[in-house]
Amino acid sequence: MSEKLIDSHLNEMFFKNIHILLLFVLLSSKALYALDAPFTIIEYANKQGLSDKKGNIIIPAEHEKLGWSTGEIKVVNGVIGYRKNGSWGLVNLKNQRVADPVYHYLEPINDQLVIAARNIPVINRIKYGLIDTKGKTIIAFEFFKLQNNADRLIAAIDEQNSIKYGIIALNGELKLPVVFNNIVAVSDNVYAATNSNGKTGLYDKKGRILMPHVLDSITVFNNHLSFAWKEGKRGLVDHKGKVLVEPGYHYIRLTGGKTSETLKYPEWCVFTQENELEKTLEYDEVTPAGKNLYKVRIGANEALINENNELLTEFKPFSIGQIENGRAVFKFKGKYGVFNQTGTTLLSPEYDSIILKSHGFQVLMHHMGKTGWHLLDVQGKLLTHQSYDIISESGHSEIYRVKKDLYWGLLSHTGKEIVFCKYDSIEWMFNGRMKVHFFGEQGILNEKGEWDLLPQKSEIDMLNNDRYVQRSKYGSFLSTFSNQKIFSTDAWLYPHGEMFLEKTRDGKYGLFDKHGKRVLPSVYEEISPLYEDSIYYVKSNYKYSFVSKNGKVLNTLDTRFREIFPMTEHFIGVRIDDKYGFVDVNGKLRIANRYEGIGKFENGYAPVKILGKWGYVDKREVLQVQPKYDTVFGFNEKLCVVVQNGKYGIIDKKGDLIVRPEFDEIRSLPQGGYLSVKDDKKGLIDADGRHVLMPRFDELSDLNNGFIFVGRKGKYGLNATNGLSIIPMMYDKIVYDDFNNRYLTMKMPEWQLMQLEK
């Protein structure tokens, strides 16, 4: 056989084997991916290739991946993307490289053009451009991002860490300048562009304005209609930018045709207490926040408005606190910031917690690798350069107690550590001084952080008039901080009102006055507080004496008393022989011990219990109110609430019934008058016992300003405490604005039918 015939035979054998091998690869590949076109992705040994519908190998399985960066797999104008070493290129159906693998991203947008991104070596940054399916650059690689919409591209550039957006045609012609904060395609032909003020307008694909920048946001068009928001309220526009429904609604329900159903926000009316309407607001919620300020909510978004309903802040998912001294803490996305009363952001929301201070702010933040508390000045400048576990008030407006690593110190309002954190604790400042605990010792620091009293193993009580008491195991003394010792004792001294209680080592008590003069010898087991600025009770061996303020014993130790009560109106309640009565300061029995129980004297009357029932006696022991009540609640100037047979009523000082006992409850109100309850309904009784409002309300609350809220069947209004209706009971909610002395009422809206076109 000739050499030529041998070569021909060998070539035929080689190609036949290759065909068999490739067929084997196709049939034994791990995965097959069907394309829209008559092609299939084949995979072998973690490589991908392409076959036609007959199984012929078009592109061998030698690529990392075939398809596009979006994950889509399709052939476009005879080419497909391939990936090599993590980068993308273009390959045609003859397995010829149309574009080298230099692209970070490839996305076909039609049958001729592909959005591409590649690294620009000069600036070492990824930039986007447009190429054709032959790899030719159509739009230069100079964009931060390109996004396709029909026959337009939303183009973004990165300038000084700020992203700006515009619109360009597929030939690179600029249709809308790249100056907007954001651009969103709301249809194939209409774009919503947001300017630097955060307001959105509408443009067509030629860049012509359809609607000026007055909207906060807009949805994608559906059937040529779109919802538009302005100041948190919903409206409706068409694809030509025509406003069909002005923004001002909570919900809009499209009914088809030329009508829609609209639901407004709840209507809030602001009234004076003379029922004069001042303004009307429409929000989900309105909350008084300060002088001429309101916090308003729409859905999950809050804002501040002034008295003219002008927005001071944007509507965002804030949680805004109350205005304090012209500032309010707000929470946004889990972090805290501060507004002032004009809505200006004083601190951006980047802190874990904020406490308003007169000289600035106390913030919880992460600084230098540690989370802790810091001080900022009123401009937000950091004053402290180390973190504290606790920053707390000290009693001085310009000094804080601080804790760091288990120890306490002092910090000025300027952020300077006056006293380093080395003490076990520092107590509240008193008269410009603070008690400090240090290794089991106590000392006194002044407001400059200087020692007025060095730490020592004793107990110290600071007093008024530049004085202190010091106790130790050796005794006690009273001294001034200028080292003038007033008096001392071998026992322990404790402040006791204006006096000093002396406790001996055997547990007996006596009294000294503030000059060190002994008022009572230390022979008593108990010495009471000073009652009515005149009398002490002293106890010894279960006997009581009454002692005047200057130490005069008014009655020698009395063996009669088994129980004794605080003195009121110069009468002392006592128990003698298991019965109760009253004595005077000399121990003389003024009201006989004949009662099962007693209460304290108020307005000249004291309750007494006889045969299980309560009545009242005066200071002459005249029974002014017969004992026939289960419970009595004490007289005010002239009336008393009583309970008889489980029902509440009101009597006067003569014992006459002013309100019959037929109510389930009667409760005194702070500003006078009474709340009455019967069959779960509430009413109002005035200070003279007159029923100005019968119990017919589900809710009744006293505002302590001469007015009350009333409510029945879910409707609310305002009444004066004399019963006069001020604001009719027709609202779904009512709120008192104590900042401005105004009343806010709310009515829920109803659905309304609206014509979209005339």
Image (cartoon, rainbow, N blue to C red):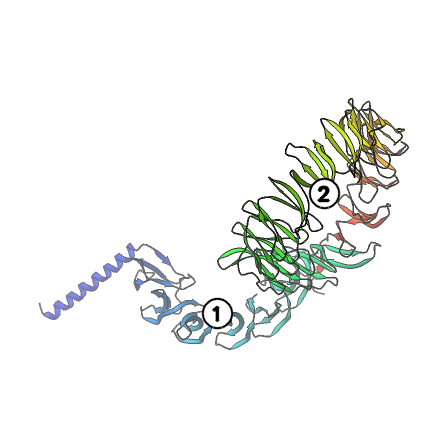
Q: Residue furthest left?
A: 1
Q: Secondary structure at mark 1?
A: strand
> Which is nearer the N-term, disc 2 or disc 1?
1
Q: Is residue 677 left or right of residue 314?
A: right
Q: Residue type at mark 2: give it.
A: Gly
* Mark 2 or 1, closer to the camera: 2
Q: Secondary structure at mark 2?
A: loop
Q: Is residue 253 left or right of residue 365?
A: right
In the rendered view, tell whether residue 468 sits above or below residue 231: above
Task: Kindly identify which residue carries mark 2.
Answer: 516
The image quarter in which residue 513 lies: top right
In the rendered view, tell whether residue 167 sits above or below residue 26: below
Quarter containing the C terminus:
bottom right
Residue at x-position 21% and y-position 64%: 15
Residue at x-position 24% and y-position 61%: 19
User: Which percent across, then down, holds residue 673?
Assistant: 84, 42
User: Which percent across, then down, holds residue 691?
Assistant: 87, 40
User: Which percent across, then down, holds residue 237?
Assistant: 64, 65
